[in-house]
Image: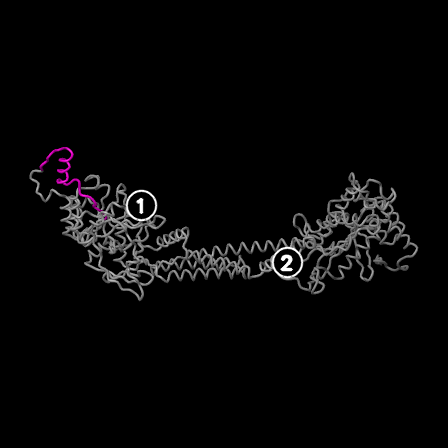
Amino acid sequence: MASDIKRLFERFKDSWAFLVTFGMLTTVLAAWLYVQQPGFLRDLNFKVYDTLLRATAGTVTTKVPVVVDLDEASLARFGQWPWPRYRVALLLAKIREAGALAVGLDIVFPEPDRTSPKVLKEALRRDLQVDVAFAGMPDALMDNDLIFGDVVGNGPFVLGYYFHFDRELDEVRGAASECALHPVSLVEKRHKGAPPASEFLISAPAVVCNIPEISEKAHMSGFFNTEPDPDGIYRKTPLFVRHKDKLYPNLALATLMAATGQRQALVNVSTQGIESVRIGQIEVPVDPRGQIYTKYRGKRGAFRYVPAWRVLEGKISEGELEGKIVFLGTSAAGLLDLRATPFDPILPGVEVHATVVDNILAQDFIQRPVWAWGLEFVLLLAAGALTTALLTWVGAAWSVLPLAASAGGMWYGAYWSMQAKGFFLSPLYPLIMLAVNFTVLTLLKYWREEGQKKYLHATFQSYLSPELIDEMFRSKANPTLGGEARVITAFFSDVQSFSTFSEKLTATQLVELLNEYLTAMTDILLADRGTLDKYEGDAVVAFFGAPMDVPDHGYRACRVAVAMQRRLGELREKWRAERQAPGEPERNVKGYPPEVWTPGDKWPRIVHEMRVRIGLNSGEIVVGNMGSTMRMNYTMMGDAVNLAARLESGAKQYGVYTLVSEATLDQPAWDEEGAPCTVRDLVEARFIDNIAVVGKSEPVRVYEVVALRGGLTEGQRELLREFDAAMEHYLAMRWDAAREGFARADALELVPQAKVTPSRAFMARCELFKANPPVGPGETWDGVFRLTSK
């Protein structure tokens, strides 16, 4: 059962449905996160909003809002805050006289003024039992709060107060019943089925307000505080707040209404929340909770600041405050009325009110319509579908460009919509979808392809070259019958007298020996980009130049042949030195005599002399998958292949161990400096014969590859000189001279103890041709010798 499930999963993993399924799962997960709006993504979305706001917001204002600033210089001239309220009353009177349309106070006066003469007189009597009389002071000036209240009640002044949103404080909750607040008059326009606007507004359970002596004289007031977003940044300002079942305006809105003479506002309410607020002819878009997106004009100083000391000392220019909507507040750091905005981490709070008024007067808003959520959701799904389709059927490399273009388009679309239309459409979730789906699917493809690649390597590494495995993996093509013709080099090798020494071993010993030998030979073959065709007992059949194009296939084949002969020499030394392990059962189970197998040796003596014959030939060969539709093999076919096999078997007649055709030596190659040459320039070879193999009429010049260029010993160099000189006599039919030359060469042969050497073979042939000339008198001999056996 488990194996069936594993097999089904492997089939599923290799199909296109695997990537589609994971792409859909990732998209569904992203959609779920979009609905849930987790905190870390919400905060990231805030940063996207800030970036777009900074990129699109302008610095031009209506110049109507002005800030009268209780700045550091004013505090230095007139003393620390709080000032006596008669001085604040004087400041307000001077602002009114300067022609301000309305004045909003970003200040709250929750306690009586302790500097009032009346309060001082009572405090001295209570604390020091001293009865102080203020001679000549009118009763009207004895109470600063009454003075301040009279001024507030006789001008376009809007008091400020402070709401508590998060917690209820007992002390302020009790004081709330004494507050004289000024609720706003709202006319609600509700869609069918929409609840009252109050159900959507932010609720404030408690308030810190002005004392009755002041608040009861005022005609209008508004709350001046709001809550930041979870990351501490102030991005939105509520226009109304619900408190004790009544609705109260923000200070900025109340001041604007006082300046324009508006006494009520129209609120559009849908089932989803509040859509907009109309003030006179201006419609203000808000979020469902009645908050306006504050479109800041930049860092602090975007609006005109007039220091309070200049107003008090009458040093403002004519018309400086005329027709302006003034907000009285502070930029002094010690008074802690500083807020973090997308532009400035320490923007004076009073400037936020000025910004809201400026946004409304300029009708320059940022809005997030209800349909924005749906559009972002659709874009998220589209991004998931796009990445899934591209990564499934196109691939990671070709997917980068369209995905990058999509990401750029989404970002530009969000930028354009905020700049041109004032809509905030967040590209965050679609961009995350593009990035996450691309990453996940790319990693899955990599994991799947690595698994497939490992499977192919594990399955075929013993039979095919790494290049063939890689090509099969890259092409994704199923093996099919058929092949192609290309010029490559065929390779055949066979162990000399294998059947003879195999009789000396048991089946287990024979397998052990062959495994060690074939492993060593195959490692050399594959390391030089050879392709293993098959094993036929002790024989190795291979080729160079397919399936991957190997331009120097002829040289590589010769290099492998030299390396194999050298490696086999090392193995012979190893086998000679090997002895049976202590306690190991006697390996000479067949009881061969000491001259065949010395007691204690691991291998019989014939193994110590094991040699391999190699035949190489290059030419046009058909390579490909051949066999039946049920079982096929990547192999080679053609006349050039047959000749390579004949050379391997024919080498026995000459007593050589690496016999190659002239076609192989004529193959192109490149030397160490990269200069073009042929294979014969890179190897040390001696001409062996001009032969016609069995079944072929065309003669072939064949050579023995002795070493790579520069690899000859002095004795081998002397052998080749003597042999080549004797071969000249032989081709000229000077049989006696040839035989004498071959005799001298025979003393230098590579394997002098061999039964057959090239020199001895030609010595015998010289005797044969001397008695039976190959051509008649006066005829020209082509030097071709026709082999009579395979």
Q: Which residue type carries mark 2?
A: Met
Residue 365: % across, % down: 30, 58
Q: Nearer the viewer, residue 633 or 680?
A: 633
Circle 1 residues within 10 Å: few <14, some 14–19, many ≥20: some
- Residue 427 lies left or right of residue 623; in this view the side is left
Q: Which residue type carries mark 1?
A: Ile
Q: Secondary structure at mark 2?
A: helix
Q: Nearer the viewer, residue 354 or 241?
A: 241
Residue 634: % across, % down: 70, 59
Q: Nearer the viewer, residue 366 or 525?
A: 366
Residue 537: % across, % down: 78, 54
Q: Examine the structure image and report whether residue 116 is included in the region drawn in magenta.
A: yes
Asked whether the beta carbons under mark 1 and mark 2 sit within 8 Å of each other, the answer is no
Q: Examine the structure image and report whether residue 369 is included in the region drawn in magenta.
A: no
Instruction: Tell me the quadrant of the picture where the C terminus can be found.
Output: bottom right
Range of residues picked out in magenta:
106-133
> Which residue is labeled 2 in the image?
472
Q: Give the Cα distance between marks 1 and 2.
A: 64 Å
